[in-house]
Amino acid sequence: MQLSLIQKLPPQECPKFFHKIIDAVCGRALPRFQDYGSIYNLTEWLEIIDETVSFFETAVSAQLSDEQILQQLSGLSSSHHEEIMKCLKVRKEEIRLALVEKTNAISSAHLEDFDWQLKLALSSDKISSLQTPLLNLDLDVRENGKLKPVSVEMNREELQNLISSLEAANKVVLQLK
């Protein structure tokens, strides 16, 4: 796992950032780019959010020891190590409960069928020149015995986030078996 972008964050800002990330893992809002825009550009921001969320989820779901966690953080300064470990120790149980809740929510709804379609966004001249690929995903989900159609339109980043979330959920499910 690569958390090298954390180095750009001053150590005194780490607790606030890490607790906001853990809040997001627990279903609350992510940290806002506006609060960190002077430190990260948008590409770095999206990467650091994804990597940090994934780190905390993996550390808890895989029940990594302190030594294993520190190995994954080997490229960071000792002050960054310390701040991550403090936040993780304080909120480990909250993260674990959130991951179990996510797993239970996923297991209570069953995917019956899906269909997908790829298209280019062409709603205006400016957008059409960008040729942004979008994915239309139609899901048939059985929830409480009733079949419910769900349609989702995603761009590349949203699709990658969905795939990452599904992979993380799969890891948690495998851990619980």
Image: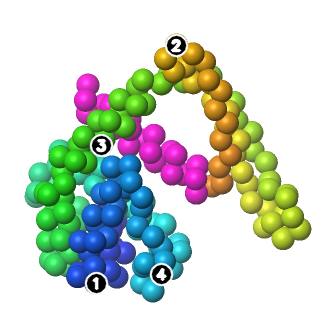
User: Which mark is first along the chain, 1 or 3?
Assistant: 1
User: Which mark is first along the chain, 1 or 2?
Assistant: 1
Q: Which residue is mark 1?
A: 10
**Contact, mark 3 vs mark 1 (Cβ under 8 Å):** no
Q: Which residue is mark 3?
A: 98
The answer to which image quadrant residue 28 occupies is: bottom left
**120 relative position to 67: left or right:** right
Q: Which residue is mark 4?
A: 37
Asked whether the viewer can see residue 144, the reply is yes
Query: Was residue 56 drawn as part of the magenta stretch in this picture?
Result: no
User: How far apart in space, not on screen, are marks 3 and 1 (Cα)?
Assistant: 28 Å
Q: How many marks?
A: 4
Q: Going by the picture, which residue comes out furthest to the right?
A: 125
- The vertical placement of 43 against 112, above or below, is below
Of the numbered discs in the image, which one, if any, rests on residue 167?
none
The answer to which of 111 and 35 lies nearer the viewer is 35
User: Which mark is first along the chain, 4 or 2?
Assistant: 4
**Contact, mark 4 vs mark 1 (Cβ under 8 Å):** no
User: How far apart in space, not on screen, are marks 2 and 4 (Cα)?
Assistant: 46 Å
Q: Which residue is mark 2?
A: 145
User: How far apart in space, not on screen, are marks 4 and 1 (Cα)?
Assistant: 13 Å
Amino acid type, mark 2: Gly
**Contact, mark 2 vs mark 4 (Cβ under 8 Å):** no
Element on which disc 2 rests: loop
User: How far apart in space, not on screen, are marks 2 and 3 (Cα)?
Assistant: 25 Å
Element on which disc 3 rests: helix
Query: Was residue 164 drawn as part of the magenta stretch in this picture?
Result: yes
What residue sits 34% from the left and 61% below the top? 21
Tag nearer the camera, 2 or 1: 2
- The vertical placement of 77 against 160, above or below, is below
User: Which mark is first along the chain, 4 or 3?
Assistant: 4
- The vertical placement of 70 against 173, above or below, is below
